[in-house]
Amino acid sequence: MVHADYRSGGCGSEMIGECVRRSAAADAQILSLKVAADSEAAQRFYLRHGFKEIGREGAYLHLEYALP
């Protein structure tokens, strides 16, 4: 989670990019995460970065990103 004072400045995008780079370098195939179903801003953020919704688990959405 990015502190409110630093949101919309690209910090979260940089962190996701670094996660993708490191995961790909480690030969991972998929990044997986859960996001609160009522957190529309977080959902938009992850979907904008290529994550896809693959299901729901209680109060959470399960998202995945297929690495190249």
Image: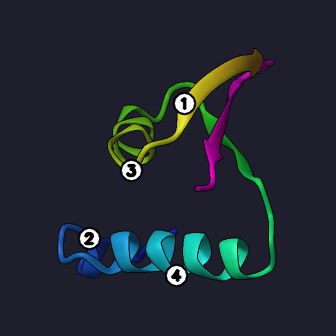
- The quadrant of the image that shows the C terminus is bottom right
Q: Please give the residue where the numbered disc 3 appears in the rendered image.
A: 49
Q: CA distance from mark 3 to mark 1?
A: 9 Å
Q: Decide: marks 4, 3 in contact (CB < 8 A)? A: no
The boundaries of the magenta stretch are 57-68
Of discs 4 and 2, which sits in the foreground? 4
Q: Position of residue 66 (x, y in %)?
A: 63, 45
Residue shown at the point (77%, 54%) measured from the top left: 29
Q: Please give the residue where the numbered disc 2 appears in the rendered image.
A: 7
Residue shown at the point (61%, 35%) measured from the top left: 36
Q: Please give the residue where the numbered disc 1 appears in the rendered image.
A: 52
Q: Please give the residue where the numbered disc 4 appears in the rendered image.
A: 18
Q: Amino acid at mark 1?
A: Lys
What's the colour scheme?
rainbow
Q: Does the magenta run of residues contain 4?
A: no
Which of the two labelled residues, at mark 4 and mark 2, occupies the earlier sequence position?
A: 2
Of discs 1 and 2, which sits in the foreground? 1
The crowding category of the residue bearing disc 4, from other C-alpha atoms within 10 Å (few below 14, some 14 to 19, many at least 20), is few
Residue shown at the point (70%, 82%) measured from the top left: 25
Q: Does the magenta run of residues contain 64?
A: yes
Q: Is residue 16 left or right of residue 58?
A: left
Q: Is residue 18 left or right of residue 47?
A: right
Q: Position of residue 21 (x, y in %)?
A: 57, 78
